[in-house]
Image: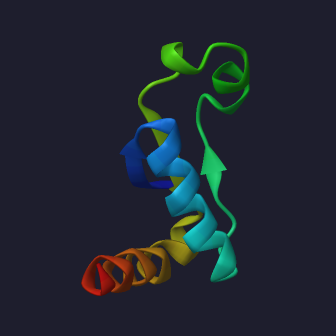
Amino acid sequence: MKEVYRGSPVECAHIRNLLEAAGIIVYQTNELMSSIEPYLAVPMILQVDEQHFDRAMDVLTANDDEN
């Protein structure tokens, strides 16, 4: 697993949606804790399998370029 993003629950939800829309499976640390006590689970960390890391970073870079 490789980390692709670290941030607030709201930011991670957006990034996760972008990656999943591109067909990339995303794993989130603190996922269960965030549903119980969201403020204790910050920062959240999104990870992908190493084989999908380059593609995930391309998706995130393309999103940055659009904004």
Whole-percent x and y of residue 10?
A: 50, 44
Residue 54 relative to residue 32: left or right = left
Q: Quadrant of residue 33?
A: top right
- Residue 20 seen in render: yes
Whole-percent x and y of residue 65?
A: 26, 85
Whole-percent x and y of residue 27?
A: 65, 50
User: Which residue: 58% across, 60% down?
Assistant: 16
User: Which residue: 43% across, 37% down?
Assistant: 8
Residue 15 relative to residue 4: left or right = right
Q: Quadrant of residue 51?
A: bottom right
* Colour scheme of the picture: rainbow
Extreme-front residue of the structure: 67
Residue 10 relative to residue 20: left or right = left
Is residue 36 placed above or below 1 in the rendered structure? above
Give the camera-side residue of 52 and 24: 24
User: Which residue: 50% across, 17% down?
Assistant: 39
Residue 66 relative to residue 56: left or right = left
- Residue 48 seen in render: no
Whole-percent x and y of residue 24?
A: 65, 74
Q: How many marks?
A: 0
Is residue 29 placed above or below 10 in the rendered structure? above
User: Which residue: 40% across, 53% down?
Assistant: 5
Looking at the rendered image, the quarter that the C terminus falls into is: bottom left
Q: Quadrant of residue 21?
A: bottom right
Looking at the rendered image, the quarter that the N terminus falls into is: bottom right
Give the camera-side residue of 56 and 21: 21
